[in-house]
Amino acid sequence: MNTVIFAATAASSSGSSNPILPATGEIIWSVLSFALLLVVLGKWAYPPVKKMMADRADKIRGDLDAADLARAEAQRTLEEYREQLAQARREATRILDEARQTGEALRADLLAKAEEDAANVRARNEEALRVDRQRVIAELRGEVGSLALELAEKIIDAEVDRAASQALIDTFISEIGATQA
Amino acid sequence: MLLAGINFPPISDVLNWRSILFSGTPFALNKVGLITLAATVITLLLFFAAGRQAKLVPSGVQNFVESIVDFIHNSIVVDVMGPDGLAWAPYLTGLFFFIFISNIFEVIPFIQMPATARMSVPAPLALIVWVTFITVGIKAQGAGHYFKNAVIPPGVPGPLLVLLIPLEILSNFIVRPFALAVRLFGNLLAGHLLLLTFAVISEAMFVKSVGLVVLPLPFAMLTALTGYEIFVSALQAFIFTILSALYISEAMKATH
């Protein structure tokens, strides 16, 4: 039983039996096969595969570029929104400040006006009082003059020249006024 | 005696194949020739299938072919040759597929013969690469410049050149193709004989009932080596391709 799995059927008919040396037929067929492979592969089989791969690479590159662009765009929009938001905030702060300032100014204004009004009223009152007092004093002078005259008439019981004595009386009252003032 | 049942076939029985067609003529077609034809047909079928699918998101055959094409493009063409070598991508891809499929028949059941274990395959391939890089060198630099750059290392004083020029000629134009061919041939022949050895031992163990006890040992070895030979098939195809790329790339560049 010396069956060999390899079932190698020896053939000394094809070339030498030396295991190192090549056989002519094998050389011719291997060269023909390889030449055929190179020609068909190079002309028809390889280019479509390579083209597909190049197309895919291009597409991926294009997609990546587009994605980059989209991201940059989104980033820019975000920046814009942020900028707008910050601007709106600044605007709001500015408006608030302005309102506060206006309020402040208005308050000060009103206060000043009120104080002025109060001063005016006070001045008017004082003026009215002064006028009243002068009027009262003048009335009082006349009253006191005629009273004193009547009194003097009654005391001296004589008819005195009213015009002549009037000057005397005025002088007298003025002196009183001067001492009073 | 246990070993008596082990019957190794003569080495020529597992390497020299009877011709199937055209026997007696130089075009005698045998198993090795069929395997190289199959390598071509399978490679082309793979590429046509991948090219016909041509889907944006690859799957199946397309994915398989594209990943190898991509690997050769990046790891061999771009890394070794740079952008100038891109025109060589189909050539190198064909080289890789042809060698790899010729190799991998080593472990395909019922065929179990690497075409590259016959010098008839690696030697012409190495010769083709040799002619290619010399042609490229002459085309790119002109014959005078190319051979001068190839054999005269720069910055070497005159007397040393006497010693170095023969060495450079030897290494660049003789050892290179020889090493390319022998490396591939030797690795695959050795792998083939290793697998054969353990297969024959396993078979003998199986046939002799007493040997069944120790059958797991050679059979485990056979299994492990089959896996290893798949790796070797890919590795040797890769080495042959990357060295070819290196030689072509060197010939393209004007400086040494």
Image (tube, coloured by chain):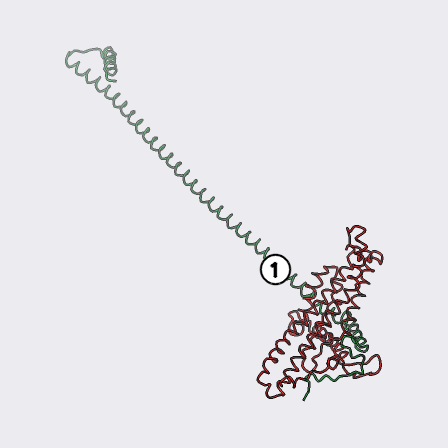
- Quadrant of the snapshot with the C terminus of chain B: bottom right
* Between B80 and B130, the one nearer to me in the picture: B130
Position of residue B17 measured from the top left corner of the image (x, y, whole percent): 76, 81
Question: Residue at (79%, 53%) from the top-left corner?
Answer: B160
Chain that is coloured green in the picture = A
* Res. A131 image quadrant: top left
The answer to whether B107 is drawn above or below residue A51 in the figure is: below
* Between A29 and A172, the one nearer to me in the picture: A29
User: Label 1 sits on what residue type?
Assistant: Ala
Question: Residue at (81%, 59%) from the top-left corner?
Answer: B166
Position of residue B204 measured from the top left corner of the image (x, y, whole percent): 64, 85
Residue for badge 1: A67
The answer to whether A99 is drawn above or below residue B241 in the figure is: above
**Chain B painted colour:** red
Left/right of residue B93 with respect to residue B57 in the rendered view: right
Q: Residues within 10 Å of mark 1 (few under 14, many from 20)?
A: few
Left/right of residue B161 with respect to residue A139 in the rendered view: right
Tag 1's secondary structure?
helix
The answer to whether A119 is drawn above or below residue A30 in the figure is: above
